[in-house]
Image (cartoon, rainbow, N blue to C red):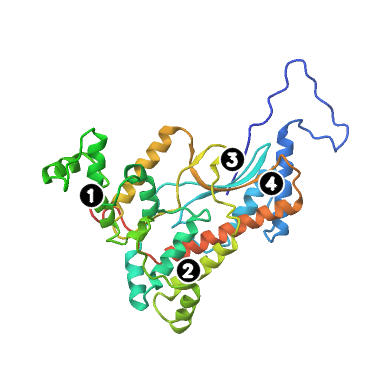
Amino acid sequence: MSINQGLVARDASPGSFLIPAIDPAIPPVMSQDVTRSRTLARLAKAAAAEGIPMPSGEFLRIEEVVQAQWTQYLARFPDGVFEGVRGSPAISVTDTSLSVVIGARTSLNVYQLKPVVEQLEAALPGLGWFVQGAMQEANYHGHEQYEMSRATYILDGLHWDLDEFTDQAYARRLLEDQGVEPPDGEIPPDTMESLRADYSFWPSEILDEVEGHEHLLGMGGTKPKRLKPAAAEKWLRQNAGHALAEPVRLSLDLIKACDADRERKFVWNGQEDDLDSLGALCFVCWDNPNLLIEAISHYEQNQYNGGQCVEAFARHMLDLTAPVTDAHLRAFVRAAVDYFNRWALLGKLLSHFPTWEDDDET
């Protein structure tokens, strides 16, 4: 956990004089930095009231106290639980806001759904998709994962106006973009071959990436049976010794935690400062992630070129321009604690899925 502060006030101009120590109530530094430090001190007190004890040790600045307080709190989670779902949490304070921001990191794990989902589906139809649904639900609460539905959302600029999600429809659109009138009926094989040499992200390729599980693309269509939580709980009671009982239990806990997050406080809101978020905790593919990784790479490069992105994907902000009570600060702390608890649940759940290594296919 790191602490970020905004820029401090400029040095006094030539000719200024310093006020001597008259009263302890007079701050030693006349700048907005004092206000920010006071906010952090109140935050530390609110965190202690919510069960995050003050850190042990000697500190010279309040920033060090807050950093140590939250670092010690996060150390209470099981070793390595956040390493498989990587992010960099930081507390940021400016003159106008207090924020917990989850920064992006590199070298993300790539998890494969297929082995676990298929085993659970063999145990009970709908159980595997229940677990996959729990992971997907976490996306809507600030726990971003690069998955195939994100890839198809990114590629929507290529596919949005297709009459149907087929290679023929895509080829027709490409020809129209070139100013060529598509022929009646099927596109000739030689034309298709030429287009395939020049363009990527064909619908058939995308569907192949999910082996026909179109619902993983987030494009509607027929969805497979997915158990309700009550049915998953019943299976868990009857199959407590199953090799995959633990991911089912973790999925139930994750869904409950997401349901409790009604305000979705950590979902990135770019309207607050006109910045676009960038990054995720991990990649989640069906089996082979090559197309997913390629799509995300194009997307991130475009975001960087646009100059309006920040390498972070989740945050919760408290407005400091209005009066802030201790109750506001305690609610702010609770939202952060809830986020870290959900994050840990997701990390535990994904630890039961195999990871893809970049030398699997090459």
Residue plotted at (52% across, 53% down): 142
Residue kind at label 4, given as amino acid type: Phe
Residue 155 lies left or right of residue 315; in this view the side is left
- Residue drawn at 67 percent across, 38 percent down: 96
Q: Nearer the viewer, residue 30 or 149?
A: 149
User: Which residue shows up at 38% across the image and 38% down it?
Assistant: 301
Q: Which callout, 4 or 1, points at the residue further toward the start of the chain?
A: 4
> Which numbered mark, 3 or 4, is in the foreground of this view?
3
Q: Nearer the viewer, mark 2 or mark 1?
A: 1
Give the SS element for disc 1: helix
The part of the image, by quadrant, that contains residue 24 is top right
Up the image or down, 309 lies above or below 17; here it is below
Image mark for residue 272? 3
Give neighbour class at mark 2: few <14, some 14-19, many 20+ (Cα, 10 Å).
many
Q: Which residue is mark 1?
A: 167
Q: Residues within 10 Å of mark 3 (few under 14, many from 20)?
A: few
Among numbered discs 3 and 2, the one appearing first in the sequence:
2
| Type of amino acid under label 3 | Glu
- Marking on residue 251: 2
Q: Give coordinates of residue 102: x percent, y percent.
A: 53, 48
Residue tagged 4: 59
